[in-house]
């Protein structure tokens, strides 16, 4: 019953320049009954870009919050959505690249903020130093080009916009960029990387969709006391006991939900479905 969540028939401004609305809008419009609009004069690139012309301030969540607030002050609306991705080594499996996508809903009318996220190892995120067009073609083949865009730079630390070729989606454009970058390079070594901007990266679009689905799930969790949406986990408590010796381990035993409005709090035991820990995870059984 979307009308009970307080978003029915409201306008939500999407703080995004990179066509993310193509995946975000259908999900949120269907599930929450709101209407997504993208403000035409929003410049989210001033909060940092993937392509080094500008570094990102603050954390992913802080950046999303800044974008959402900017969109609200620009439009005078009260409801905003912002999405933010980050790419790098997987936190537990460092040889795998991953894409962490977060999406934030900021509702000034209900005075709440709800976050959805996903951590996906389905990403083409990669970069390499190359010296020839043949090497660029080999990289492109692995990166899912031309469905996925590429970026060529005369050197990887350049901040000069004329030495950065973005959004490359054709063989001809790739060839031209490699030749120009090689001509600009003093070392004959140039940099190639995947273009992670959403409109040039269908794999990332899927991760953004997954984060949006997670946002919807989190919105639908309403506070049992006051009915406010976004009754979310605020804390994980360790101490799941070892199956063999019953000592507490560092694994999660329970999670705590808390309402942003009335601060009603609820502890849920065994959120991962496990009531005891594998002795291999126990400091006494497996020191
Ligand atoms: Zn509440
Ligand atoms: Zn043990």
Image (spheres, helix red, strand yellow):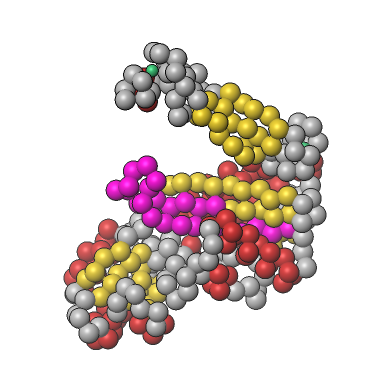
User: In terms of depth relative to the viewer, which is nearer, 73 or 281?
Assistant: 281
Q: Quadrant of ligand 2?
A: top left
Q: Quadrant of the C terminus?
A: top left
User: In terms of depth relative to the viewer, which is nearer, 226 or 181?
Assistant: 226
Query: Against 125, is 137 above or below?
Result: below
The quadrant in which residue 283 appears is top left
- Does 276 sit left or right of 182 as displayed? right
Find residue 214 and report its horizontal and vertical position in percent.
Answer: 58, 43
Q: Quadrant of the N terminus?
A: top right
The quadrant in which residue 84 appears is bottom right
Find residue 270 and report its horizontal and vertical position in percent.
Answer: 54, 23
Residue at the image point whose x is 35% and y is 82% from the top: 163
Residue at the image point whose x is 55% and y is 69% from the top: 47
- Does 3 sit left or right of 36 as displayed? right
> How many numbered circles does the render carry?
0
User: In terms of depth relative to the viewer, which is nearer, 72 or 198?
Assistant: 72
The quadrant in which residue 235 appears is top right
Q: Is 81 covered by the magenta stretch?
A: yes
Residue at the image point whose x is 19% and y is 80% from the top: 188
Could one spot residue 104 in this view of the protein? yes
**Magenta segment, which residues?**
79-102
Find residue 172 and report its horizontal and vertical position in percent.
Answer: 30, 77
Residue at the image point whose x is 30% and y is 70% from the top: 192
Query: Against 218, is 123 above or below?
Result: below
Find residue 76 and report its horizontal and vertical position in percent.
Answer: 78, 68
Query: Against 156, is 68 above or below?
Result: above
Query: Against 241, is 123 above or below?
Result: below
Examine the residues drawn in magenta and state their main secondary structure.
strand
């Amino acid at each position: 019953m979307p009308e009970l969540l307080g978003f029915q028939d409201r306008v939500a401004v999407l703080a995004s320049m990179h066509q993310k609305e193509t995946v975000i809008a259908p999900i949120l419009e269907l599930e929450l009954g709101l209407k997504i609009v993208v403000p035409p004069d929003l410049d989210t690139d001033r909060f940092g870009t993937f392509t080094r012309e500008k570094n990102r301030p603050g954390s992913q969540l802080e950046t999303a919050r800044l974008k959402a607030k900017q969109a609200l002050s620009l439009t005078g609306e009260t409801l905003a959505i912002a999405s933010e991705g980050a790419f790098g080594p997987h936190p537990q499996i460092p040889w795998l690249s991953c894409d962490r996508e977060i999406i934030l809903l900021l509702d000034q009318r209900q005075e709440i903020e709800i976050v959805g996220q996903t951590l996906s190892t389905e990403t083409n995120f990669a970069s390499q130093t190359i010296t020839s067009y043949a090497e660029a073609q080999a990289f492109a083949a692995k990166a899912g080009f031309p469905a996925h865009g590429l970026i060529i730079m005369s050197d990887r630390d350049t901040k000069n916009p004329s030495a950065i070729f973005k959004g490359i989606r054709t063989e001809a454009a790739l060839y031209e960029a490699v030749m120009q970058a090689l001509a600009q390079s003093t070392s004959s070594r140039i940099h190639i990387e995947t273009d992670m901007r959403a409109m040039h990266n269908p794999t990332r679009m899927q991760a953004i969709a997954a984060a949006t689905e997670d946002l919807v799930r989190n919105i639908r969790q309403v506070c049992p006391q006051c009915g406010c949406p976004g009754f979310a986990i605020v804390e994980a408590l360790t101490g799941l006991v070892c199956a063999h010796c019953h000592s507490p381990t560092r694994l999660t035993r329970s999670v705590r939900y808390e309402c942003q409005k009335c601060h009603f709090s609820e502890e849920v035991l065994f959120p991962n479905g496990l009531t005891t820990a594998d002795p291999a995870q126990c400091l006494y059984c497996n020191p």
